[in-house]
Image (tube, rainbow, N blue to C red):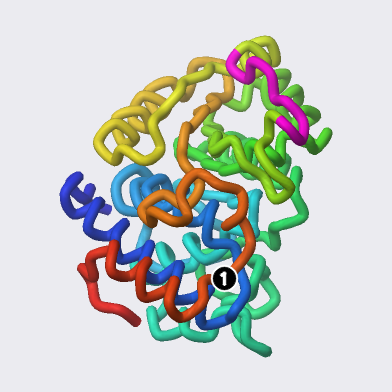
């Protein structure tokens, strides 16, 4: 897969943000805030960072893999998968509809290309990524496994079990990212349950730790390349990614209030007026 340049990545990200708000508005349900904040990350991953092969199969042999643990931000993932060619963008219009493959949370029973696990029950994705990364090492593959979690998700104990496991087994082909937007469904993470010094915690658990700016495409791509350069050195890699929930839309940015509600008609029009249509709406 050829790498996409920064200008084009930003153009794709603008279109993905349009897709997100249109999907959630069309369904009158969904999670726009975290999706908008993580748009640059998913676009960078699929169009620049990951080594992807043509087509899709569940085995994922001889290619990099990605697992979304905070599955409620499915709108951004679906949009990126469609824009990357895994399925037709027209299918995005069926988001959260009965019998749609584009469910509210990613699932596997409908066979949507790009989805390898059901997710959204928070705390589980890092464990799955550990297993996939170990399988690649056992198979003699040199590919990487990426995973994304939310910061509020770190309140789940299974995350820290997986963190210990990955370090103990030297799963050094694993690059995990935490979306540090400081917000969760009930309010700011500092008010719900303070996360403390996350860099010190992950380092104490035996991980390489980097920090990135998740809403600055050029800086983000450089940080993800740095993370890749750390692979193979005996430790899993943690990317603490600083983002703003709702990034790109002025009335959504920086607040937990847009964690899980849909814009009305007027709000959709306002949001779309702030986002350039670069690839054509579905």
Would residue 84 be seen by someone viewing this image from the given angle?
Answer: no
* Residue in view at x 70 percent, y 15 percent: 205
Q: Which residue is mark 1?
A: 262
Rendered image quadrant of residue 181: top right
Q: Is residue 124 left or right of residue 267?
A: right
Q: Report x, y in % for residue 10.
A: 24, 52
Front residue of this view, candidates 54 and 10: 10
**Crowding near the residue tagged with mark 1, few <14, some 14–19, many ≥20 C-alpha atoms within 10 Å:** many
Q: Report x, y in % for residue 232.
A: 48, 22
Give the farthest residue toward the bottom: 98
Above or below for 11 versus 219: below
* Residue in view at x 59 percent, y 62 percent: 31
Q: How many marks?
A: 1
> Does dot 1 land on a helix, a strand or a loop?
loop
* Residue in view at x 64 percent, y 15 percent: 197
Where is the C terminus found, in terms of image quarters? Answer: bottom left
Front residue of this view, candidates 61 and 56: 56
Would residue 246 be seen by someone viewing this image from the given angle?
Answer: yes
**Residue 163, magenta (yes or no):** no
Rendered image quadrant of residue 182: top right
Give the farthest residue toward the right: 157
Q: Report x, y in % for residue 106.
A: 63, 66
Rendered image quadrant of residue 249: bottom left
Above or below for 153 versus 279: above
Q: Is residue 157 left or right of residue 129?
A: right
Q: Which residues are magenta?
A: 191-199
Front residue of this view, candidates 5 and 182: 182
Front residue of this view, candidates 175 and 216: 216
**Residue 197, magenta (yes or no):** yes
Q: Is residue 211 left or right of residue 44?
A: right
Above or below for 16 versus 257: below
């Amino acid at each position: 897969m050829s790498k996409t340049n920064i200008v084009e990545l930003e153009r794709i990200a603008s279109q993905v943000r349009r897709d997100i708000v249109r999907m959630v508005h069309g369904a009158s349900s969904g999670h726009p805030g975290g999706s908008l904040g993580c748009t640059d990350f998913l676009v960078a991953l699929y169009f620049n960072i990951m080594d992807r092969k043509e087509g899709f199969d569940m085995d994922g042999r001889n290619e990099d893999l990605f697992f979304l643990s905070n599955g409620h931000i499915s709108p951004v993932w679906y949009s990126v998968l469609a824009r990357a060619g895994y399925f037709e963008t027209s299918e995005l219009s069926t988001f959260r509809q009965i019998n749609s493959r584009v469910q509210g949370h990613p699932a596997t029973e409908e066979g949507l290309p790009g989805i390898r696990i059901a997710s959204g029950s928070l705390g589980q994705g890092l464990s799955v990524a550990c297993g996939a990364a170990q399988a690649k090492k056992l198979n003699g593959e040199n590919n990487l496994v990426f995973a994304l979690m939310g910061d509020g998700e770190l309140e789940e104990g299974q995350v820290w079990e997986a963190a210990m496991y990955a370090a103990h087994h030297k799963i050094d082909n694993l690059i995990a990212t935490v979306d540090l937007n400081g917000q969760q469904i009930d309010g700011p993470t500092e008010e719900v349950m303070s996360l403390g010094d996350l860099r010190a915690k992950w380092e104490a658990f035996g991980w390489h730790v980097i920090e990135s700016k998740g809403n600055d495409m050029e800086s983000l791509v450089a940080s993800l390349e740095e993370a890749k350069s750390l692979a193979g050195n005996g430790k899993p890699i943690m990317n603490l990614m600083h983002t703003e929930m709702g990034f790109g839309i002025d009335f959504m940015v920086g607040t937990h209030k847009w964690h899980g509600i849909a814009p009305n008609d007027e709000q959709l029009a306002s949001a779309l007026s702030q986002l350039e249509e670069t690839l054509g709406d579905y």
